[in-house]
Each structure stands twice: as structure tokens, then as C-alpha cells.
Image (cartoon, rainbow, N blue to C red):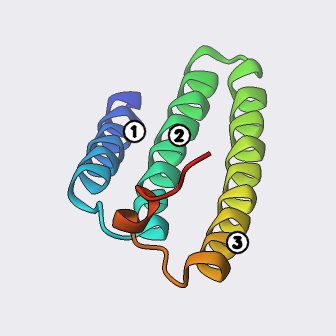
Amino acid sequence: TDPIQYFTFSMIISISGIRGILLNRRNIPIMSMPIESMLLAVNSNFLVFSVSSDDMMGQSFASLVSTVAAAESAIGLAIFVITFRVRGTIAVESINSIQG
């Protein structure tokens, strides 16, 4: 198959992820889902480059990105839970009142 089809697919996923971040600014977990879809698009690009160039480096980068995405999701979920316990809401408007 042609790698251009896969690149087009990952470009569509990336654009929809950027669109999701820009349009959904009300709820933090919904804002984090497009970030995960953009990481999925990056993973698919790494895998397609790896297969098309017959090199294993892209596959190792894809596993690294998957590991970072899993850690980011776990830390983000912990932050959501703590914020909800303290504030009672996870709306983006309430985060403006957080002071360090």
C-alpha cells in the first residue's frame, strides 16, 4: 500500500486534535482527549516511516511516545481528581482562581 494514505490519515487525526483543543475549552478531560489523538497521529507517522524506510528506529520512537502518553494520562487523571476534590469542579473557568 501507499504510505501517502497513512500520512493523510494521520494528518486528518492531527487536524481534528487541534480543532478539538481549540473548540472544547470548557472541561479539562475533554481537552486532554485531543492531545492523545495527536500523539496517536505522531505514533502512526513514526510507524509508517519505520516500515517505509525498513528501519526499526521509528518503532522504538513509537513505543517511547506511547509510554510518555500513558504517563501523561496517569498524571493528568491524578491532577483532575485532586482538583475535583479541592474545588468541586473541573471546569476550566475555575482554574483561573488557582494561585501559587
Q: Nearer the viewer, residue 35 or 65?
A: 35
Q: What residue type is disc 1 on?
A: Tyr
- Say whether marks 1 and 2 touch (CB < 8 Å): yes
Q: 10 Å neighbourhood of mark 2: few (<14), some, or many (≥20)?
A: many
Q: Mark 2 or 3 closer to N-term?
A: 2
Separation of disc 2 and disc 3 at Cα? 33 Å
Q: 10 Å neighbourhood of mark 1: few (<14), some, or many (≥20)?
A: some
Q: Quadrant of residue 47?
A: top right
For mark 2, give the secondary structure.
helix
Relative placement, left or right, of 9 versus 70 is left
Q: Mark 1 or 2 closer to N-term?
A: 1
Q: Is residue 12 above or below residue 60?
A: below
Q: What residue type is disc 2 on?
A: Ser
Mark drawn on residue 44: 2
Mark drawn on residue 82: 3
From the top left corner, tell me how far across and down residue 51 is, in percent.
61, 27
Relative placement, left or right, of 15 versus 96 is left
From the top left corner, tell me how far across and down residue 64 is, in percent.
77, 35
Q: Quadrant of residue 4?
A: top left
Name the quarter where the N terminus is drawn: top left
